[in-house]
Image: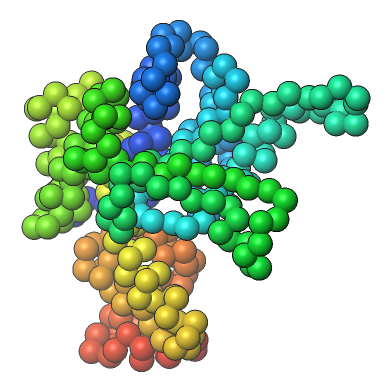
Amino acid sequence: MTDEKQPVYFTYKDRVFRLLFRDKHRLLELYNALNRTNYSDVDSLTTTTLENAIYMKMKNDVSFVIDCSMCLYEHQSSYCPNMPLRGFLYLADLYKKYIRNADLSVSRRIKIPTPHYIVFYNGLEREEEEFVQKLSDSFEDGKEGCMELTVRIININYGHSKELMDRCRSLADYAYFVAEIRKRLEYMSFQEAVVQAVDICIEKNVLREFLLEQKAEVIAMSIYEYNEEYVRKVLMEDGEERGYTRGRAEGRAEIVKTVRRMKDRELDIAAMADLTGQEESYITEVLELLQAYPKESDLDIAKRMGV
């Protein structure tokens, strides 16, 4: 994994956050820190994560039931205004699974756990320690409607949410790990930054046992995440969204531009397809045209593809 030219296979849809808090002991530690409770028996927590549920090309991170609460915890490395809608869809599936085949026409009230949806945010667009998103903000007419869903967004960038970090060592260590990667991204490649961050954290006893046990997976997942974060910024902000107003060809030209940059970073075709949301055959065609016409602009390459 330390050889920069070694291909990294992006078959993962997990993230380091999900892998870290898949462990029930860490998950219970996080729950206690958020709620100032003192649960010690991990069997009091029942994981309900829907492994095959994917929204917006992202798996849910972790969901569980404890006492009378249905908890949905997600991690976001960039600001997304659609988290309430995503949570609404996911929670609906969780409750379907929870009540199973219950007859909803019976005269007695069917009790369900109270939902708590929290997003752990370590993006760079928002600086607040904590803020809230509501489903009603997405209603087309701006009216109240008959339902609401509120998402609590907590900033977990290193140096933020100190009280919570003091109560949850695992979360504090994760924040430090992410900060170490970002610090190194200013002057080295994704892979070098991730590998060095892993090594320095192990040396400093930050997530040491977790990183020693899961080192290869953590490195692969982290490289995926930071490549994806980079591509999302370049492609979605500068490409597809402006492409709707500037025309399809110019929007697709931004995809060509992104593929060109990923080619320079020696990503394989599978990774490029995964990160851009395109078919591998499309990426292959772009690469062939870039090789055949190296001096042509991204827009000209896109036009050659008939878009």
- x, y percent for residue 281: 47, 69
Q: Nearer the viewer, residue 301 or 130?
A: 130
Q: Is residue 206 above or below residue 52?
A: above
* Residue name at image x 45 percent, y 82 percent: 243
Q: Is residue 266 above or below residue 84?
A: below
Relative placement, left or right, of 285 versus 207 is: right
Question: What's the colour scheme?
Answer: rainbow
Tell me the quarter of the picture where residue 296 sits.
bottom left
Q: Nearer the viewer, residue 38 or 174?
A: 38
Relative placement, left or right, of 201 versus 42 is: left
Q: Quadrant of the N terminus?
A: top left
Tell me the quarter of the picture where residue 241 sits.
bottom left
- x, y percent for residue 145: 70, 55
Q: Nearer the viewer, residue 263 or 85?
A: 85
Tell me the quarter of the picture where residue 24 sits.
top left
- x, y percent for residue 255: 38, 75
* Residue name at image x 50 percent, y 44 percent: 151
* Residue name at image x 51 percent, y 11 percent: 43
Q: Is residue 199 above or below residue 57?
A: above
Look at the image and tell me whether residue 170 can be seen.
no
Q: Looking at the image, how many numbered discs can be counted on the residues? A: 0
Q: Residue furthest front?
A: 144
Look at the image and tell me whether residue 182 can be seen.
yes
* Residue name at image x 59 percent, y 33 percent: 115
- x, y percent for residue 128: 31, 49
Q: Nearer the viewer, residue 72 or 274?
A: 72
